[in-house]
Amino acid sequence: MAARFRTLEDLPLFATEEQLASAIMGTGSLVAWKNVVAKLEADGFPRIDGLHGGRYVPAVKRFYDDLYGVRPDRRPPPEPDRPAEIGKWDRLRQRNGHRG
């Protein structure tokens, strides 16, 4: 029976390489994962915790969130909506000598 696809949220707090490979790259990707993770560790990817026998999953997720700029706690507040200035574009075009 094939392993069920899992997400990082489904994993235990400390996940094995096989669990992480499946959640991040898909089922059956352990060999590819080992090549990828070897490169990522040089950039600060969380290492295997010897006491727990796996990588700390929240740190793994944070690593990827930082890598791809997905940090909900650091988003700037949204700009307030401004009312549309109806006709502004046409007025600017006319002022600059363009005719529509």
Image (cartoon, grey):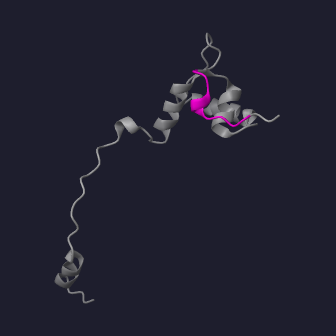
x%, y% of residue 9?
A: 57, 31
Q: Count all numbered tags in the image, as a single digit.
A: 0
Q: Nearer the viewer, residue 78 or 41?
A: 78
x%, y% of residue 67?
A: 49, 38
- Residue extending farthest to the right is 1
x%, y% of residue 5?
A: 69, 37
* The C terminus: image quadrant: bottom left
Q: Nearer the viewer, residue 8 or 71?
A: 8
Q: Which residue sits at x=21%, y=74%?
A: 86
Q: Which residue sits at x=73%, y=37%?
A: 27
Which of the 4 image quadrants contains residue 53? top right
Residue 9 falls within the magenta-colored stretch: yes
x%, y% of residue 73?
A: 37, 35
Q: Which residue sits at x=63%, y=12%?
A: 50
Q: Is residue 8 above or below residue 95?
A: above
Q: Nearer the viewer, residue 57 or 42?
A: 57
Q: Which residue sits at x=40%, y=38%?
A: 72
Magenta span of residues: 4-13
Which of the 4 image quadrants contains residue 20? top right
* The N terminus: image quadrant: top right
- Residue extending farthest to the left is 95
For residue 90, side relative to residue 8 (left or right): left
Residue 6 falls within the magenta-colored stretch: yes
- Residue extending farthest to the top is 51
Q: Main secondary structure of the magenta part?
A: loop
